[in-house]
Amino acid sequence: MCKKDSKIHLCTCTHIVEKDTFFHQNMNVKLSIKWTLHRFLKEGWIGMDGIMFSPVDAFSTSLTSDFFRDAMNSSNCFDFDYCPSEGDNIIFKLIIYDKMSHRNFSEEKFISLIFRNGVWVIDYYDLFYNTIEEIGKGFLKFIE
Protein backbone atom coordinates (compact mmCIF):
# COMPACT_ATOMS: atom_id res chain seq x y z
CA MET A 1 0.00 0.00 0.00
CA CYS A 2 1.08 3.57 -0.55
CA LYS A 3 2.85 5.19 2.37
CA LYS A 4 2.09 8.74 3.35
CA ASP A 5 5.76 9.73 3.01
CA SER A 6 5.97 8.84 -0.68
CA LYS A 7 6.04 11.61 -3.30
CA ILE A 8 3.78 9.79 -5.72
CA HIS A 9 0.88 7.36 -5.53
CA LEU A 10 0.45 4.81 -8.30
CA CYS A 11 -3.30 4.21 -8.53
CA THR A 12 -4.76 1.30 -10.46
CA CYS A 13 -7.52 3.48 -11.84
CA THR A 14 -8.00 2.88 -15.56
CA HIS A 15 -9.14 6.30 -16.75
CA ILE A 16 -8.30 9.95 -16.25
CA VAL A 17 -10.53 11.72 -13.79
CA GLU A 18 -10.76 15.50 -14.28
CA LYS A 19 -9.64 16.15 -10.69
CA ASP A 20 -6.49 14.08 -11.29
CA THR A 21 -5.25 16.20 -14.18
CA PHE A 22 -2.93 19.07 -13.32
CA PHE A 23 -1.07 22.04 -14.67
CA HIS A 24 2.67 21.72 -14.16
CA GLN A 25 5.26 24.50 -14.16
CA ASN A 26 5.35 26.38 -17.45
CA MET A 27 3.27 23.82 -19.34
CA ASN A 28 0.07 25.57 -20.37
CA VAL A 29 -1.99 22.39 -20.76
CA LYS A 30 -3.60 19.95 -18.36
CA LEU A 31 -1.54 16.82 -17.86
CA SER A 32 -1.81 13.36 -16.45
CA ILE A 33 0.78 10.62 -16.15
CA LYS A 34 -0.10 7.03 -16.97
CA TRP A 35 2.03 4.20 -15.63
CA THR A 36 2.34 0.65 -16.92
CA LEU A 37 4.13 -2.11 -15.02
CA HIS A 38 5.72 -5.00 -16.93
CA ARG A 39 7.32 -8.29 -15.97
CA PHE A 40 10.42 -9.39 -17.88
CA LEU A 41 9.90 -12.81 -19.52
CA LYS A 42 12.85 -13.56 -21.77
CA GLU A 43 15.63 -12.21 -23.92
CA GLY A 44 16.02 -12.89 -27.63
CA TRP A 45 14.96 -11.55 -31.02
CA ILE A 46 11.17 -11.52 -31.22
CA GLY A 47 11.02 -11.34 -35.02
CA MET A 48 9.43 -7.92 -35.30
CA ASP A 49 10.43 -4.94 -37.43
CA GLY A 50 9.52 -1.34 -36.77
CA ILE A 51 10.64 1.85 -35.07
CA MET A 52 11.49 1.96 -31.39
CA PHE A 53 11.13 5.14 -29.36
CA SER A 54 13.63 5.88 -26.61
CA PRO A 55 12.70 7.29 -23.21
CA VAL A 56 13.24 10.94 -22.34
CA ASP A 57 15.22 12.23 -19.37
CA ALA A 58 12.43 14.56 -18.24
CA PHE A 59 8.88 15.73 -18.86
CA SER A 60 9.78 19.10 -17.27
CA THR A 61 12.46 20.54 -15.01
CA SER A 62 11.10 18.77 -11.94
CA LEU A 63 9.43 15.70 -13.48
CA THR A 64 12.66 13.93 -14.37
CA SER A 65 13.72 10.32 -14.56
CA ASP A 66 15.74 10.97 -11.37
CA PHE A 67 12.56 12.20 -9.61
CA PHE A 68 10.65 9.03 -10.55
CA ARG A 69 13.58 6.74 -9.66
CA ASP A 70 14.04 8.40 -6.27
CA ALA A 71 10.29 8.29 -5.51
CA MET A 72 10.08 4.60 -6.44
CA ASN A 73 13.14 3.72 -4.33
CA SER A 74 12.03 5.73 -1.27
CA SER A 75 8.81 3.80 -0.57
CA ASN A 76 6.19 1.46 -1.98
CA CYS A 77 4.05 3.81 -4.10
CA PHE A 78 1.52 1.26 -5.38
CA ASP A 79 -2.10 1.10 -4.21
CA PHE A 80 -2.01 -2.72 -4.34
CA ASP A 81 0.16 -5.37 -2.74
CA TYR A 82 3.22 -5.51 -4.98
CA CYS A 83 6.78 -6.66 -4.42
CA PRO A 84 9.08 -5.95 -7.40
CA SER A 85 10.87 -8.85 -9.08
CA GLU A 86 14.24 -8.62 -10.76
CA GLY A 87 13.75 -7.19 -14.25
CA ASP A 88 10.34 -5.59 -13.65
CA ASN A 89 9.86 -2.47 -15.75
CA ILE A 90 7.67 0.57 -15.11
CA ILE A 91 6.93 3.14 -17.78
CA PHE A 92 5.55 6.60 -17.01
CA LYS A 93 3.85 8.14 -20.04
CA LEU A 94 2.75 11.76 -20.39
CA ILE A 95 -0.94 12.24 -21.26
CA ILE A 96 -2.12 15.68 -22.36
CA TYR A 97 -5.72 16.79 -21.92
CA ASP A 98 -6.92 19.00 -24.77
CA LYS A 99 -9.62 21.42 -23.56
CA MET A 100 -10.73 22.31 -27.08
CA SER A 101 -11.61 18.77 -28.16
CA HIS A 102 -12.15 17.34 -24.67
CA ARG A 103 -9.94 14.43 -25.66
CA ASN A 104 -6.85 12.93 -24.15
CA PHE A 105 -3.86 12.13 -26.24
CA SER A 106 -0.56 10.57 -25.46
CA GLU A 107 2.75 11.93 -26.60
CA GLU A 108 5.61 9.60 -27.37
CA LYS A 109 7.34 10.92 -24.26
CA PHE A 110 7.96 8.33 -21.58
CA ILE A 111 10.31 7.62 -18.68
CA SER A 112 11.34 4.03 -18.00
CA LEU A 113 12.75 2.31 -14.91
CA ILE A 114 13.87 -1.30 -14.44
CA PHE A 115 14.16 -3.08 -11.08
CA ARG A 116 17.73 -4.40 -10.82
CA ASN A 117 19.69 -5.63 -7.82
CA GLY A 118 16.99 -4.54 -5.38
CA VAL A 119 16.51 -0.96 -6.66
CA TRP A 120 14.78 0.89 -9.50
CA VAL A 121 17.29 2.20 -12.07
CA ILE A 122 16.82 4.41 -15.12
CA ASP A 123 16.83 2.02 -18.06
CA TYR A 124 14.55 0.51 -20.70
CA TYR A 125 14.10 -2.69 -22.68
CA ASP A 126 14.72 -3.02 -26.39
CA LEU A 127 11.39 -4.56 -27.34
CA PHE A 128 12.89 -6.12 -30.48
CA TYR A 129 15.10 -8.32 -28.26
CA ASN A 130 13.18 -8.61 -24.98
CA THR A 131 9.77 -10.04 -24.17
CA ILE A 132 7.78 -8.41 -21.38
CA GLU A 133 4.17 -8.71 -20.25
CA GLU A 134 1.92 -6.10 -18.68
CA ILE A 135 1.07 -6.85 -15.04
CA GLY A 136 -0.48 -3.55 -13.94
CA LYS A 137 -1.46 -0.06 -15.05
CA GLY A 138 -3.12 3.10 -13.88
CA PHE A 139 -2.53 6.79 -13.27
CA LEU A 140 -0.15 8.67 -11.06
CA LYS A 141 -1.29 10.97 -8.29
CA PHE A 142 1.01 13.40 -6.53
CA ILE A 143 0.96 13.47 -2.75
CA GLU A 144 1.07 16.99 -1.36
Image (tube, rainbow, N blue to C red):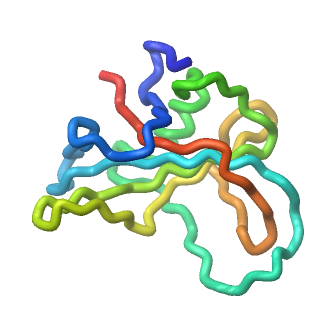
User: In the picture, residue 76 is in which quadrant?
Assistant: top right
Residue located at (52% from left, 54% from top): 111
- Residue 54 sits above or below residue 139 on the image: below
- Residue 134 sits above or below residue 83 on the image: below
Whole-percent x and y of residue 31? Answer: 27, 50
Residue located at (46% from left, 33% from top): 11
* 136 left or right of 144 in image: right
Q: Residue furthest top?
A: 4
Residue located at (88% from left, 69% from top): 44
* 90 left or right of 18 in image: right
Whole-percent x and y of residue 66? Answer: 51, 42
* 67 left or right of 80 in image: left
- Quadrant that contains the C terminus: top left
Whole-percent x and y of residue 27? Answer: 20, 55
Total numbered labels: 0
Q: Residue furthest front?
A: 14
User: In the picture, residue 49 is in which quadrant?
Assistant: bottom right
In-front residue for pair 129/11? 11
- Quadrant that contains the N terminus: top right
Q: Residue furthest left?
A: 100
Whole-percent x and y of residue 70? Answer: 54, 33
